[in-house]
Amino acid sequence: MSERLPTREQALQLLKQSGCSTNVVKHCEAVAQLAVEIGEACLKRGFKVDLELVEAGALLHDIGRSKTHSVYHAVIGASIAKSLGLPEQVLSIIKRHVGGGIAANEASKLGWAKDVYTPKTVEEKIVSYADKLIEGSHRVPIERTLEVFAQDLPASAVERVRRLHEEMSGMIGDCEWLP
């Protein structure tokens, strides 16, 4: 597996070659823009963040949507990324970005291989969080996301997103540019 991160142009090309729709590509671009802004805010507050990894991971986080729009897009996307020879850190962002992460018992119920499906690194958390603040290609407040998640997901999943929001808010401070 290569340890070289794809450039922005290469990542966009991989999305298109994999069969992602224009809407998915636009969504990934919007998530990447916000994720980089969040990463920059973290850097300003003294946190160590790999902005190139954040951008590459955010651009590719939904590559699995070329095959399915279900929750399985995370594991399918990681598989696609692996077949493309992308670095392990990008695979981890892809498989750990859904919801606020997927708990081990939930992953088991979904039939997923035993693995970690919750964001662990700061870059994984930034991409997962940015994804929760983008609906389509537009920024939305976290309250909107929590409302939508509460309609379809168990309370534990909503709580993971709430905890991710609290953690990221603590890292980035008061940002008027957040939705």
Image (cartoon, rainbow, N blue to C red):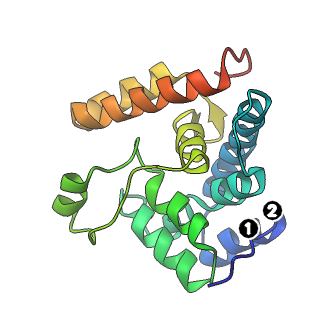
Q: Is residue 36 above or below residue 161?
A: below
Disc 1 residue type (three-letter): Ala
Image coords of residue 6 (percent x, y): 76, 70
Q: Which residue is mark 2?
A: 8
| Near-viewer residue (80 or 51) | 51
Q: Is residue 34 above or below residue 98?
A: above
> Is residue 37 rendered to the left or right of residue 162?
right
Q: Quadrant of the N terminus?
A: bottom right
Image coords of residue 68 (percent x, y): 42, 66
Disc 1 crowd, CA 10 A, few/some/many (<14, 14-19, 20+): many
**Do the residues bearing badges 2 and 1 touch, measured as CB atoms within 8 Å?**
yes
Image coords of residue 166 (percent x, y): 48, 23
At x 38%, y 29%, the residue is 148
> Is residue 54 rendered to the left or right of residue 8?
left
Q: Name the quadrant containing residue 116.
A: bottom left
Disc 2 residue type (three-letter): Arg
Q: Which residue is mark 1?
A: 11
At x 37%, y 23%, the residue is 147
Real-space Cα distance between discs 2 and 1?
A: 5 Å
